[in-house]
Structure formats: C-alpha cells, structure tokens
Image: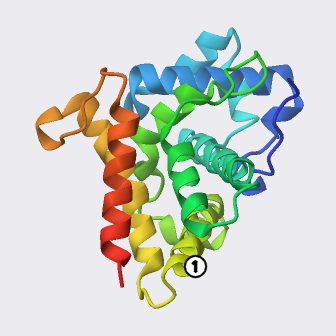
Amino acid sequence: MPILQFSVNQTLYLRNPNDSVLGRKIISESIRLINQLGFEHFTFKKLARAIGSTEASVYRYFENKHRLLLYLIDWYWLWMDYRFEVVTQNLKEPKERLNACLKALLTDDSPGANGHEPNLRALKNLVMAEFEKTYLTKHVDQDNREGVFLPYKTVCKKLAALIREINPSFPFPHTLISTVMLTANHQLFYAEHLPSLTDIKAHTGHSDTQLECFLQLMIYKTIEP
C-alpha cells in the first residue's frame, strides 16, 4: 500500500515528517506514546528515547508538542474527509450519504498501519481523548487564522451540506453537525472511562452500532420538518 499523502497545514511543522524515515517514526511513535501516557505526560524527551534519537532531532520537525498534536489531529480529519469521499462516491440520496459518513466516522474498517502510515485505529483513539485540547487554548484564534482547523471544519461543512439537502428549511445545520461530531467522541470516551454517563457499552463489539443508531436518532429527530 502506498503512503497516504495529505497536505497538512505547513505552519504546523518545521520539516515535513513524511519526507524522511525519522519523520515518519516521529509520527507513528508519538501516536503510540500519547495514547499510552496522555498528552500531559508526553514529552519530546520521551519520544526521542522511544525512537532512538535526540530531542534536538524531534525539534527539527516540530516547534513544540502542541504543534505536533495539531499535526496528528489535522492528518486524521484529512483522512476522514478522504474516507467520506470514498464511502459516498456511488450513493445518490443525501440521507444515504450522511448515514455512510456516520458509519465511517465510527467504525474501524480502515487499513492497518504498514510501517509507513499512522496506525489509524490508534490515531482515532488519540482524537477521542485529545481532540479538544487542540482548540481549548488561549491561542485558538491565532491558530484559526493560520487555517489550522480547516480539515475539521471541512468535514463538518460537508455533513452540514447533507443536512441542508435532506431538509433545506432546517436553520442550524452546522450547529447540529458540530454537536454530533463532539457527541461521537464524548460518548465513546464515556463508554470507555465513565460508563455511568452513557448507555453505549464498551467492549461488547456493538458500541459503534449503538452510537451510530443514537447519532442517527439525534439528527433525524432534530431535522424533521
């Protein structure tokens, strides 16, 4: 399988990690370590030790760990945008396309890592736990001006457009979709760590299907004329 190439915002890195073996190791190992340690305890020193390199080498690629996290999250949403295009290409009805996108958002039927690409399941877990840390910051407005959140906003815009196709008179398509996107992350996180806050059951093999049904109910009950 060829390396998946997406145009991640160039302000997020000092050197494109896709251009070298070391850069790709930085990406793959940072996903593993952030999942293992949590973003708060993740450091470039620990990352350098894990990849058998130096902190200075990591800093040649990323200014700080927040920019690295933004890079990983942006890559994920670029990947999700690509998946949406794939799963909807032969579907004509907007409701069919929206349902297909919801399933793609929740399921883990992506190809596994092959030594070059990020481990997509691990990256999804990282997004579930760490996504909100990318924008709940004092410099969110500057990051937004630099286009850092464009991949996520593009995904939301595409789903909001499908809501408009289904019900052109519904006045809050972007509000609904941005709520649904965060709800998906929250409910999966709750199922894993705070189960009394959700009816979605983790480790049953049916959590994706349960959450998919809930999100569909949430959307279609809301936009009914």
Residue 209 picture location, percent across and down: 39, 38
**Circle 1 residues within 10 Å: few <14, some 14–19, many ≥20:** some
Q: Quadrant of residue 35?
A: top left
Seen at 25% across and 34% down, the residue is 191
Give whichever of 6, 27 is nearer the camera: 6
Report the amino acid beneath label 1.
Glu
Q: Quadrant of residue 193?
A: top left
Q: Quadrant of the N terminus?
A: top right
Give whichever of 176, 96 is nearer the camera: 96
Residue 132 picture location, percent across and down: 40, 52
Compared to residue 85, the image places residue 105 above or below, namely above
Left or right, 39 with reference to 7: left
In the rendered image, which residue does mark 1 sit on? 165
Q: Quadrant of the C terminus?
A: bottom left
Seen at 42% across and 86% down, the residue is 170
Give whichever of 56, 16 is nearer the camera: 16
